């Protein structure tokens, strides 16, 4: 089964992708991770990507598609993959369609994680992590059991991402709605879009996704 998780920054796509990976035996594909792996491996497409990145430029769509093409040909992707963070634009979506068609593969489902923007901003701006072990916390939803002390490792040092502030989050949301949100209509028209409540608690979001995947598997 091949699927895309679609939703704005902070919707929880990465968390859910990891859970699907564990429960379904699929491979989570992150464009950033794939780029770094291709560069490290010194593949032909990796060399092209390295040259672009060393110039401080953005990697072009054709390079990203080339890296995805190499990655999904690897044996561990035989059962299927999860794309998180790609495609981001209609042009990328069309290129992905062409790539999969050329390989005789299909995109089974696109799961849209619907969110409330203001609640999402609160969710993101309240995040902080343990500086020692990386355990995640939130000002409102998940404070340490002992104030100022990490539940997992006992560290008293915490950190926040510099870009987890309301102004930056609103700018990231604007970019999402301008560039990526049109994919919702694109995949709806192709008949592959399924929407879930991305503002539910993590376990409930997982349950909703599992229901969608089970329905898709039964219909296959």
Image (cartoon, rainbow, N blue to C red):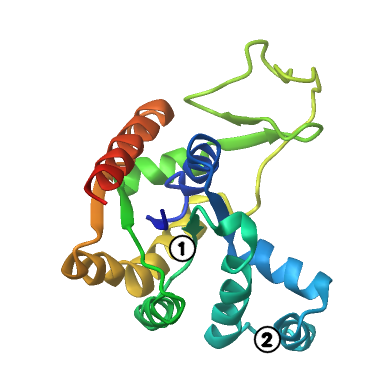
Q: Residue at x 57, y 58 (%)?
A: 77
Q: Position of residue 48 (x, y in %)?
A: 73, 88
Give the structural element (helix, strand or loop) at label 1. helix
Asked if residue 75 lies left or right of residue 198, the reply is right
Give the number of the disc on residue 172.
1
- Quote the CA–CA distance across marks 1 and 2: 20 Å
Crowding at label 2, few (<14), some or many (≥20) Cα neighbours within 10 Å? few
Q: Residue at x 41, y 26 (%)?
A: 203
**In front here: 104 or 209?**
104
Q: Earlier in the sequence, mark 1 or mark 2?
A: 2
Q: Position of residue 198 (x, y in %)?
A: 33, 41
Residue found farthest to the top: 146
Please say if 187 is above or below 97.
above
Asked if residue 95 lies left or right of residue 127, the reply is left
Asked if residue 70 lies left or right of residue 86, the reply is right
Q: Residue at x 38, y 28 (%)?
A: 201
Give the number of the disc on residue 57.
2
Q: Position of residue 180 (x, y in %)?
A: 36, 69
Q: Position of residue 172 (x, y in %)?
A: 46, 63
**In front here: 80 or 115?**
80
Please say if 125 is above or below 74.
above
Instruction: Report which quarter residue 150 is drawn in.
Output: top right
Instruction: Report which quarter residue 118 is drawn in.
Output: top left
Give the number of the disc on residue 6.
none
Instruction: Report which quarter residue 135 is drawn in.
Output: top right
Q: Residue at x 68, y 62 (%)?
A: 33
């Amino acid at each position: 089964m091949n699927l895309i998780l679609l939703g704005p920054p902070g919707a929880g796509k990465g968390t859910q992708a990891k859970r699907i990976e564990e429960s379904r035996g699929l491979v989570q594909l992150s464009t950033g991770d794939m780029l770094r792996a291709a560069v490290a491996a010194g593949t032909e497409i990796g060399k092209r990507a390295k040259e672009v990145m060393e110039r401080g430029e953005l990697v072009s769509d054709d390079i990203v598609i080339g890296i995805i093409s190499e990655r999904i040909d690897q044996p561990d992707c035989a059962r299927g993959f999860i794309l998180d963070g790609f495609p981001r634009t209609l042009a990328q979506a069309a290129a992905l369609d062409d790539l999969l068609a050329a390989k005789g593969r299909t995109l089974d489902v696109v799961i849209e994680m619907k969110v409330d923007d203001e609640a999402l901003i609160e969710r993101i701006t309240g995040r902080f992590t343990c500086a020692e072990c990386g355990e995640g916390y939130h000002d409102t939803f998940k404070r340490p059991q002992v104030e100022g002390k990490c539940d997992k490792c006992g560290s008293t040092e915490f950190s926040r991402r510099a870009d987890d502030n309301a102004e930056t989050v609103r700018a990231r949301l604007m970019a999402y709605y301008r560039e990526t949100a049109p994919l919702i209509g694109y995949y709806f028209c192709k008949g592959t879009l399924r929407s879930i409540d991305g503002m539910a608690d993590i376990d409930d979001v997982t349950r909703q996704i599992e229901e969608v995947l089970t329905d898709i598997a039964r219909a296959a």
